[in-house]
Image (spheres, rainbow, N blue to C red):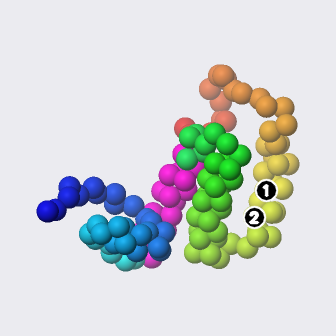
Amino acid sequence: MSLEKVFYNKLIRDKIPEKITNKGSALETRELSDEEFEKELIKKVEEEASGLQKAESKEDFTAEIADIYDVLEEIKKLKNISDDEIKVAQQESLEKKGGFDKKTFLVWSEKDDYKSNEM
């Protein structure tokens, strides 16, 4: 008896195939090219970050943040970005844009040269 296939088409962690086969299920995987790997890592950041919306407890948030960190660490390795470079970029961003201490929520603004990552 064959079960229905679920197509995920996404980057997964190294031990996931073993977990699936240990449950007696079949699967298909393939190795990504370097270019595909980079593209899928970027998509994985968004996937992992979306998990924060479902988190309820401190433990949930901790686990979701750890998953995000893991993906970011892999991107840092791939792009040869050091922790020091990240700290410098964080400081520059803080000086240029500020932090989040004021908890400011932008409802609207007149059209100008402000560019958000979402736009």
Relative placement, left or right, of 65 versus 3 is right
Q: Number of labelled discs?
A: 2
Residue at point 78%, 51% (across, down): 93
For the magenta stretch, what is the residue range? 34-50
Specify the quadrant of the image occupied by residue 6: bottom left
- Circle 1 packing at 10 Å, graded few (<14), some (14-19), many (20+), is few
Amino acid identity at mark 2 = Ile
According to the picture, the residue beneath numbered tag 2 turns out to be: 86
Residue at 79% x, 31% y is: 103
Q: Quadrant of the N terminus?
A: bottom left
- The residue carrying mark 1 is 90
76 vs 119: above or below: below
For the residue pair 24 and 64, the one nearer the viewer reads as 24
**Image position, residue 94 (x, y; %):** 82, 49
Main secondary-structure element of the magenta-colored stretch: helix
As for residue 115 lying within the magenta part, the answer is no
How packed mark 2 is, by other alpha carbons closer than 10 Å (few <14, some 14-19, many 20 or more), is: few
Q: Amino acid at mark 1?
A: Gln
Tell whether label 1 touches label 2 (CB within 8 Å): yes
In this image, 86 relative to 29: left or right?
right
Specify the label residue 16 is tagged with: none
Provide residue 56's location: percent of width, then percent of height.
Answer: 63, 39
Up-down relation of residue 22 to residue 60 (above or below): below
Can residue 35 be seen from the camera position used here?
A: no
> Mark 1 falls on what kind of element?
helix
